[in-house]
Image: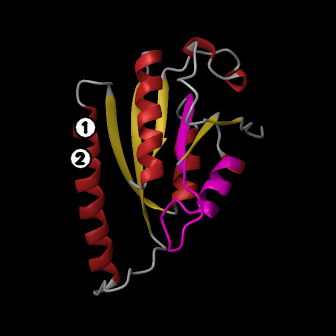
Amino acid sequence: MEPTTHLAEASSASPCLSPCAKVLSGNRGNPVRRILLATDFSPASLKAAERAIALASQCGATLTILHVININAQPARGELGTAEELMKQRWAEGSVQMGRLAWSLSGQVEAQTLIEEGLPWEKIVEKSGDFDLLILGKSSAQPGWRPFSQHTVRRVIRNAARPLLVVPA
């Protein structure tokens, strides 16, 4: 059975989607109870987090925040060390940033965090099947490389197993 992906792009001017019980036609009228927010901690992802918090709160849904440590990431300028040392550093940085994001949500919505290692688009697509809605931030084309590059976003859009809300920066 081929997954169906329905893409909704949120506008910065639009209010939260409602009613949540039937938020997306692609969800076959089923209530949104579990939301997956994929984040790379970029400004676009943080804007998507705001939308995810609002929707989770409005829907009474649980929110899972996923960060993927990219196994193919190239060292940033000035980063030195073995591949193992660089991965440990990325895990440490991801854990700190995830902790900050989770702390900022306390009291707003029921949330859990998840950090995985792999190719971001593959892990996001793999995990999306366990949720009613996937939310992802999309930044405008910028110089430099980010874990959620335009390439990652396009692949998630094409392959997500559930309805997807893309929040532009």
Q: Quadrant of the N terminus?
A: top right
Question: What residue is shown with label 1?
Answer: 104
Task: State the CA–CA distance, disc 2 to disc 1.
Answer: 6 Å
In reply to whether residue 28 is colored magenta, the answer given is no
Q: Mark 1 is on which residue type?
A: Ser
Image position of 168 (left or right of 4): left
Give the magenta-colored segment's residue range. Answer: 132-157
What residue is rendered at 65% in x and 33% in y?
A: 163
Q: Are marks 2 and 1 in contact (CB under 8 Å)?
A: yes
Closest to the observer, 132 or 60: 60
Could you say which quadrant of the image residue 68 lies in? bottom left
In reply to whether residue 145 is colored magenta, the answer given is yes
Q: Which mark is residue 100?
A: 2
Q: Which mark is residue 116?
A: none
Could you say which quadrant of the image residue 106 lies in? top left
Q: Residue furthest right?
A: 1
What residue is rendered at 52% in x and 53% in y?
A: 123
What residue is rendered at 50% in x and 74% in y?
A: 144
Picture coordinates of residue 82, whole percent (x, y): 30, 86
* Residue 50 position (above or below residue 74): above
